[in-house]
Image: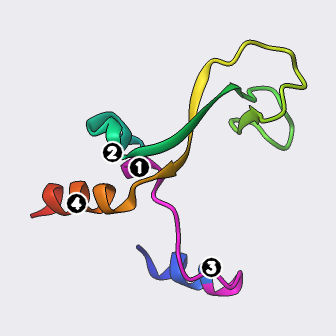
Amino acid sequence: ITDRTVKRMAEFGRTTFLLPDPLAMAAVLDPDCVRHAEKRFVEVEVVGQHTRGQTTVDWYGFSGRTPNANIVIEYDMDRVFALLKAAVS
């Protein structure tokens, strides 16, 4: 975590932050660490003026498109932290 990240977190009143890459790897390495996941249609915006490269999730099925991704909603964080600890020790 960088000083810049800590400063930005403080500006928004946050005391925690997400680690999306390690969480994704945890789900792959130990699928049992996923407590709850939901299938949703996901797309990456590639032509938007303000959102280019942004991942969009159709949470409510408004698009009518077939879900193409599993979105992890909840992790067993004890398992995730055990994986992280094992990776750096």
Per the image, label 3 sits on a secondary structure element best described as helix
| Mark 2 touches mark 1? (CB < 8 Å) | yes
**Residue 64's spot in the image, x, y percent?**
86, 15
Q: Is residue 25 above or below residue 78?
A: above
| Residue drawn at point x = 68 percent, y = 85 percent | 13
- Type of amino acid under label 1: Leu
Q: Is residue 43 left or right of residue 28?
A: right
Q: Earlier in the sequence, mark 4 or mark 3?
A: 3
Which residue is disc 1 drawn over? 23
The image's colour scheme reads rainbow
- Type of amino acid under label 3: Arg
| Mark 2 touches mark 4? (CB < 8 Å) | no
Q: CA distance from mark 2 to mark 4?
A: 10 Å
Determine if the magenta segment contains residue 16.
yes
Determine if the magenta segment contains residue 8.
no
Magenta segment:
10-23
- Type of amino acid under label 2: Ala
Q: Which mark is residue 26?
A: 2
Which residue is disc 4 drawn over? 82
Residue density around tag 1, few if under 14, some if 14–19, many if 20 or more, within 10 Å: many
Q: Is residue 21 above or below residue 40?
A: below
Which residue is disc 3 drawn over? 8
